[in-house]
């Protein structure tokens, strides 16, 4: 069994490999590399370095080699080791004392923008250190599901490069024009190019909304469980979050009325189609009631709709926005879940006053998005490749979903429960035996597979989310076998 380990989050990570063809000894290469990084300020005085065992694992060398490298650095006064405190960069070697050296760790832990949740940092660290892990955690398409060949063909056919200066603050006009047609033909949404803001994805859209349309102390309603709980941006903005429980038919609109009376909520965030992480679809009656309640209370709704076109039967549920005659819904979409996350293209449909406000804020951050990915996205949306790609994507996602379900039923009979999703990228599972989320994640990583614990999404412990779109087809069955081993180890 291949064993993976997890380092402490405060340890420095060394992403470098020594040159085994060099005549210079490995220990000396490691010592020289660390000294160079320290002199560049990459590891300031006082920084905690990985343990000898951990660094040996990261670099793929024997522990004795690292012991020799550390001994070399200690002899030069560059690092210092203390029992129980680990090995740290010396605070005095470079002419700096604690009185004169900025406490970068304190700065890094300060500020109003919170770091990612510990589980997510642990998952990211594991995937960075061990790319061979079978990845059921990352919420994106695998390379074999992305339209790589189609986009390469479009770029070959269209060699013209647009003007590379700063773009319109709302985004590339041809892309917004293409989205007008896409939204009308595929989602039943009537929009004009002036009501569309191009973003780098759904998360940037949400960030702009939380930062620009809401104020610290405002109360908002969010589904539970929800992907939004994995985004500390809500807490960073000082918002008070109130839960809308999700059952097999989605949220209950009456809960919004209750929250409004108790907490004067200012905005509602929903993902009504193939909800992340549960995969549920808000039923038609509840959609109508949700719009009625929001209209009665004058509440704006943020509708995040990344998965609708993945509907396996080919008939995606209509978005709330298509039923919105008065402009009370901010509609968010993205290329990430249907084409390529690396393009970093998302969009928002909103009243022009909102678009203008958010475009102004975004311009303060980055003066607009890169023009070339926007050009590629516009060409792809308008091309004859888009429809066939979506058909192939749905077919392959359905196949991967079924592989995952069959593997779970075979490997863990009676130990997991789930509702089969009819679209989206995720399978939401309840574990029957009680296990500790963190310990199960650690055990799974040691065995070569990674997933997201359900508590990341605001839910109670005892749930897991498997993303079947991310792992390669050949890895799904062995990945679930590894997860089953981890779970059985936890329950004895």
Image (cartoon, rainbow, N blue to C red):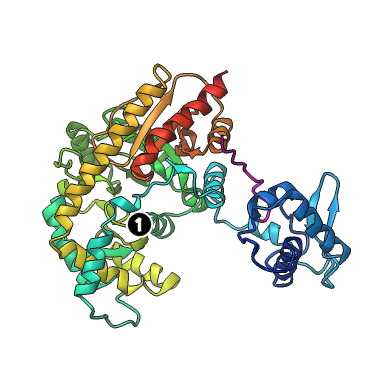
Q: Position of residue 413 (x, y in %)?
A: 39, 18
Measuring 54% from the left and 35% from the top, which residue is drawn there?
A: 447
Tell me: residue 198, above or below residue 425.
below
Q: Main secondary structure of the magenta part?
A: loop
Q: Position of residue 197 (x, y in %)?
A: 28, 64
Report the number of discs.
Answer: 1
Q: Position of residue 306 (x, y in %)?
A: 29, 49
Is residue 6 shown in magenta? yes
Is residue 158 shown in magenta? no
User: Is residue 395 toward the left or the right of residue 462 in the image?
Assistant: left
Measuring 17% from the left and 41% from the top, which residue is drawn there?
A: 317
Measuring 25% from the left and 35% from the top, which residue is drawn there?
A: 281
Magenta residues span 1-12
Tell me: residue 357, above or below residue 315.
below
Q: Nearer the viewer, residue 197 or 75?
A: 75
- The residue tagged with tag 1: helix, strand or loop? helix
Whether residue 337 is visible, yes or no, is no
Q: Which quarter of the picture shows residue 334? A: bottom left
Question: Label 1: which residue?
Answer: 341
Q: Quadrant of the N terminus?
A: top right
Whether residue 354 is visible, yes or no, is yes
Q: Which quarter of the picture shows residue 111? A: bottom right
Q: Nearer the viewer, residue 258 or 91?
A: 91
Measuring 24% from the left and 41% from the top, which residue is drawn there?
A: 296
């Amino acid at each position: 069994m291949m064993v993976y380990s997890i380092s402490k989050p405060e340890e420095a990570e060394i992403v470098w490999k020594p040159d085994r063809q060099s005549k210079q000894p490995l220990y000396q290469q490691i010592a020289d590399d660390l000294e160079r990084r320290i002199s560049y300020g990459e590891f300031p005085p006082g920084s905690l370095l990985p343990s000898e065992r951990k660094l040996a694992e990261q670099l793929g060398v024997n522990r004795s080699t690292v012991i020799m490298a550390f001994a070399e650095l200690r002899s030069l006064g560059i690092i210092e080791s203390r029992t129980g405190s680990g090995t740290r960069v010396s605070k005095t070697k470079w002419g700096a004392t604690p009185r004169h050296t900025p406490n970068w760790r304190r700065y890094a832990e300060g500020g109003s923008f919170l770091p990612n949740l510990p589980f997510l940092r642990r998952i990211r660290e594991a995937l960075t250190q061990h790319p061979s892990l079978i990845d059921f955690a990352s919420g994106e398409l695998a390379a074999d599901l992305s339209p790589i060949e189609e986009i390469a063909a479009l770029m070959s056919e269209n060699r013209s490069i647009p003007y590379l200066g700063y773009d319109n603050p709302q985004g590339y006009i041809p892309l917004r024009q293409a989205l007008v047609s896409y939204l009308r033909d595929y989602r039943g949404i009537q929009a004009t190019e002036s009501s569309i803001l191009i973003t780098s994805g759904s998360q940037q859209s949400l960030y702009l909304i939380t930062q620009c349309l809401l104020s610290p102390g405002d109360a908002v309603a969010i589904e539970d469980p929800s992907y939004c709980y994995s985004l500390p941006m809500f807490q960073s903005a000082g918002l008070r979050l109130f839960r809308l429980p999700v059952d097999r038919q989605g949220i209950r609109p009456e809960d919004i009325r209750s929250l409004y009376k108790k907490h004067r909520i200012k905005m509602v965030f929903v993902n009504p189609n193939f909800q992340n992480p549960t995969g549920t679809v808000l039923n038609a009656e509840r959609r109508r009631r949700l719009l009625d309640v929001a209209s009665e209370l004058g509440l704006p709704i943020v509708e995040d709709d990344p998965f609708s076109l993945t509907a396996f039967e080919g008939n995606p549920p209509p978005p709330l926005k298509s039923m919105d005659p008065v402009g009370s819904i901010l509609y968010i979409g993205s290329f990430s879940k249907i084409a390529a996350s690396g393009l970093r293209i998302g969009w928002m449909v909103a009243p022009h006053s909102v678009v203008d406000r958010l475009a102004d804020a975004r311009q303060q951050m980055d003066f607009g998005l890169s023009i070339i990915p926007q050009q590629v996205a516009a060409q792809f949306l308008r091309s004859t490749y888009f429809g066939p790609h979506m058909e192939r994507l749905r077919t392959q996602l359905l196949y991967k979903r079924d592989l995952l379900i069959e593997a779970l039923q075979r490997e863990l009979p009676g130990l997991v429960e789930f509702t089969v999703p009819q679209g989206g990228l995720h399978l939401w599972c309840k574990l029957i035996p009680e296990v500790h989320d963190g310990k199960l994640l650690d055990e799974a990583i040691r065995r070569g597979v990674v997933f997201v614990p359900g508590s990341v999404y605001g839910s109670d412990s005892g749930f897991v989310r498997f993303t079947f779109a991310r792992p390669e087809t050949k890895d799904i069955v062995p990945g679930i076998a590894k997860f089953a081993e981890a779970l059985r180890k936890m329950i004895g």
